Image (spheres, rainbow, N blue to C red):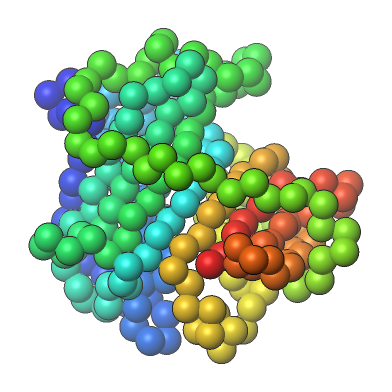
Amino acid sequence: MAEIGCKYTRDIKILPSMVDRNEKLRLVDALDLFEDTATLHAENFDIGPAGMDARNYFWVITKIRIHVDGLPRIMDALQLNTWIQAPDRASCERDFSFTSGDEQLIYGRSIWAIISRVTMRFVHMDEIYPKVEFDVAPPDDRPFARINKNFDEAETIGEYTVRSVDIDLGGHFNNVNYVRAMLGCFSVEEIEAMNIKEMELNFIHQTYEGETLTYKSRKTDDGIEVGAINSEGKPVFLSVIR
């Protein structure tokens, strides 16, 4: 159904379940909305949940950068846009934006891959990626941050044990929940003082129910770096908050 094209847009309303105490959209809810909208777009090409299950494949998101120009407020009516870029051999880029009329409020760039449930190896994008014209907007070509994975000397800011409610259709800790747990290590006052304008999120390894992650942070010239460390001492998630 290539007539859908490389872009998909839906109208949304910012509901009470999506906002913080200041009645502004939470960034984790923006990420949830993005993931849902990406799925709706993918369904048109038979690469949504049903199509991927039939092939014994699943999507994994490896990196996201989310940039905030302004946070929408409770009951605001917006457009949520997502569009895909031309793929590489084993990865692809999907961008998204929240817009109000001609004003862009939030922009995101994400990198995805496909893994076979049979071999647990990456699948070549050419096998199932839609054949469309990639003509919406050029990709954000800023490189993603290179985060030092060694957090031995960093401050411990919290621990989180993965619970049943955190598990997604892949059977592991949902990616957005890494971010939810990370931000939960800070108080409301600390979050508000950060006045977050950008976050980079790097998902490295899968985590499962019952595992406990230790969140550590350090301040750098680039912002606040956070790592989620598993019981083996390995980082499974990294972030820069600016």
Task: Please give the name of the residue rendered at 56% of the width and 39% of the height, measured from the top-left corner.
Answer: 62
Q: Is residue 116 above or below residue 224?
A: above
Assign the N terminus to one quadrant of the image: top left
* Res 52 quadrant in image: top left
Residue 194: % across, % down: 54, 79
Count of labels shown? 0
Is residue 42 shown above or below 153? above
Identify whether 59 is placed above or below 120: below
Seen in the image, is 189 located left or right of residue 209? left
The one of 87 and 209 positioned closer to us in this rendering:
87
Relative image position of residue 123 (x, y in whole percent): 53, 16
Q: Residue at x 47, y 63 (%)?
A: 198
179 relative to 68 in the view: left or right: right
Q: Is residue 162 left or right of residue 199?
A: right
In this rendered view, identify the residue nearer to me: 102 or 222.
222
Residue 53 visible within the image: no
The answer to whether residue 144 is visible is: yes
Instruction: Find residue 70 and report its horizontal and vertical position in percent.
Output: 31, 72
- Front-most of 8 and 117? 8
Quarter where residue 131 is shown? top left
> Residue 159 versus residue 7: which sits nearer the camera?
7
Residue placed at 53% from the left, 54% from the top? 200
Percent across and percent down for residue 130 are 29, 19
| Residue at the (31%, 48%) spot, across then down | 96
**Of all residues shown, which one is farthest toward the front?**
221
